[in-house]
Image (spheres, rainbow, N blue to C red):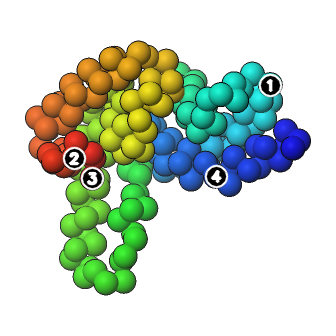
C-alpha cells in the first residue's frame, strides 16, 4: 500500500475524531485547516510512524502540536466561537425545540467549563472524557506517564465538579 493510500485510509477512519478533538482542544469550530494540516504532516512524516502503535494516537499528537503552534502564532486571539456538538444533533427529529435548546445550552456550558480549565487538565479531559481514549492512548498522545494521566484526569474532573454546569456524569466519570 502506498503512503498516499495509507493516509487516505486513515483520513476516512480518523478525520472525524481529529476534527472533534481539535474543536474541543482549540474552542473553535473552524478547524478544517488544522485537520488538513494534520494529515499532510502525517503523509510527510509517515516514515517516522511506529506501526506498533495506534495511528489514531499518532494523529492526535500531530493535531495537538499543530494546535499549540497555531495558538502560539495568535497568542492574544480570543476564542470567537463556541463549538457545536454533533452529538446533540443526533436524534433531533424526536425532540422538541425546547429540549434541543436545553441540550445545546448544556453543551455550551460544558465547553465553557472545559475551556476554563488549565491546559493540562483540558487536554486530559478532552482525550479521556470526551474522546474516550484509554489511559495508555492518552499517555501516548500527551507524552505523559499513565500515572500522570490518571492523576490529572482525576484532578480535572474535580475542577469541573467545582464549576457550575460542569456536565460531569458522576457515575461513569465521562463527560456528557
Residue on which the image places disc 1: 47
What kind of element bears circle 4? Answer: helix
Q: Is residue 176 left or right of residue 68?
A: left
Res. 24 visible in picture:
no
The disc at residue 172 is: 2
Residue at 28% over, 80% down: 95
Element class at badge 2: loop
Query: Taking 39 as reference, is 164 left or right?
Result: left
**Residue 134 rendering spot, x and y as whole percentages:** 41, 35
Labels 1 & 2 near each other (Cβ < 8 A): no
The residue nearer to you, when weighing 8 against 120, is 8
126 or 57, which lies in front? 57
Mark nearer the N terminus (1 vs 3): 1
Mark nearer the N terminus (4 vs 3): 4
- Label placed on residue 176: 3
Could you tell which of marks 2 and 4 lies nearer the N-terminus? 4
Can residue 15 be seen in the rendering of this structure?
A: yes
Judge depth for marks 1 and 3 and give the one in front.
1
Image quarter hosting the N terminus: top right
Evaluate if marks 1 and 3 touch, with contact meaning CB atoms under 8 Å apart.
no
Secondary structure under tag 1 reads: helix
Find the distance from the CA under tag 4 to the CA under tag 3.
Answer: 23 Å
Amino acid at each position: 500500500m502506498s503512503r498516499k493510500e495509507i493516509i487516505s485510509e486513515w483520513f476516512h477512519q480518523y478525520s472525524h475524531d481529529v476534527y472533534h478533538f481539535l474543536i474541543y482542544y482549540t474552542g473553535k469550530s473552524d478547524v478544517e485547516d488544522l485537520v488538513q494540516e494534520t494529515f499532510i504532516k502525517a503523509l510527510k512524516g509517515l516514515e517516522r510512524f511506529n506501526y506498533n502503535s495506534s495511528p489514531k494516537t499518532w494523529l492526535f499528537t500531530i493535531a495537538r502540536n499543530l494546535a499549540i503552534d497555531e495558538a502560539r502564532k495568535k497568542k492574544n486571539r480570543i476564542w470567537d466561537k463556541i463549538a457545536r456538538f454533533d452529538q446533540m444533533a443526533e436524534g433531533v427529529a424526536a425532540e422538541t425545540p425546547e429540549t434541543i435548546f436545553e441540550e445545546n445550552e448544556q453543551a455550551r456550558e460544558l465547553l465553557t467549563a472545559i475551556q476554563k480549565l488549565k491546559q493540562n487538565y483540558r487536554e486530559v479531559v478532552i482525550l479521556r472524557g470526551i474522546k474516550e481514549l484509554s489511559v495508555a492512548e492518552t499517555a501516548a498522545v500527551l507524552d505523559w506517564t499513565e500515572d500522570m494521566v490518571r492523576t490529572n484526569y482525576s484532578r480535572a474532573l474535580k475542577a469541573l465538579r467545582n464549576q457550575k454546569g460542569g456536565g460531569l456524569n458522576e457515575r461513569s466519570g465521562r463527560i456528557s
